Each structure stands twice: as C-alpha cells, then as structure tokens.
Image: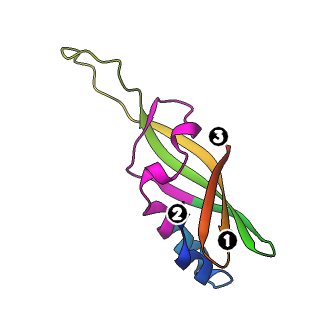
Amino acid sequence: MIRLTKVTQAWGQPDFEVVLKTALEGLDVHHLPLQQGLSAGSYALDKDVRVMFIGAEEGVNTLQIKVGVFYTSIIAGCNCADDPTPVDELSEYCELLLEIDKDTAETAVSLVGS
C-alpha cells in the first residue's frame, strides 16, 4: 500500500492538484494498476507517466480522488533477435480511483476505466 501524506496535507489548499500530480507521477509504475488498464500494448512502461485530476469527494474518514493517467506501453515478446522492426511505444490512458485514509494517508488504488 502506498502512503500519500503530502496529498492529504494539501487537501483544500490551492496547490492540491499540483501536489497530487507530483506525488503520483513520482511513484514507481508498479504501485499503480497501469498494467491492468492497457488497451493497446502488453507491457506498461514506467516513463512519461502524466496525471490529470478529474475530481474528488471527501468522506468522513477518506478522500476519494479520481484521476486520468496518460502513459505508454509496448507489445513485448514478439520480436526475434534478427527482426529489424523497432519496438514502438503506444499511447495508453486509464482512470484510477484513489481512496486515501485521512488519518494515515494510506492509499488504495483501483482501476475504474480505460
């Protein structure tokens, strides 16, 4: 589980979206369900991940934040050693729901659309 302490601290502040984007874009791609959100490729890459804030709701104990994620993938495992065809990066997009505990900043991330 990931902990987004700076995001919970920035909740309600003017720089909330910037803090959220910075925190998510700085995470290792394996902390996000990007592999499950693939629509064009077979392997999610961990570079050039960009996050777009969609919306948020505050519950009694949690923040529920919806974001769009732009990233790239490749089709892995289909090239022979002597194949001159370059591996092309494919554009991907998915939407994630972050459920952040307001007290501990522990964050559950789930895929909600691609």
Q: Could you say where residue 55 lies in the image, as x and y percent from the top left?
A: 72, 64
- Residue at 62 percent of width and 55 percent of height: 109
Image quarter where the C terminus lies is top right
Please identify, in this view, whether the residue under mark 3 or under mark 1 is nearer the observer.
Answer: 1
Q: Could you say where residue 29 lies in the image, as x and y percent from the top left?
A: 44, 51
| Number of the label disc, if any, that sits on residue 89 | none
Q: Is residue 108 above or below residue 72?
A: below
| Number of the label disc, if any, that sits on residue 2 | 2
Q: Which residue is mark 3?
A: 114
**CA–CA distance in space, label 3 to label 1:** 25 Å
Q: Is residue 87 above or below residue 62?
A: above
State the extent of the magenta-drawn residues as a range.
22-51
Q: Is residue 57 left or right of residue 73?
A: right
Q: What's under tag 3, amino acid-wise?
A: Ser
Pointer 2 or 3: first along the chain: 2
Q: Residues within 10 Å of mark 1 (few under 14, many from 20)?
A: many
- Residue at 56 percent of width and 70 percent of height: 20
Q: What's under tag 1, amino acid-wise?
A: Asp
Q: Residues within 10 Å of mark 3 (few under 14, many from 20)?
A: some
Q: Could you say where residue 34 lies in the image, as x and y percent from the top left?
A: 53, 44
Q: Which residue is mark 1?
A: 101
Q: Is residue 86 above or below residue 55?
A: above
**CA–CA distance in space, label 2 to label 3:** 22 Å
28 or 69, which is in the foreground?
28
100 or 86, which is in the foreground?
100
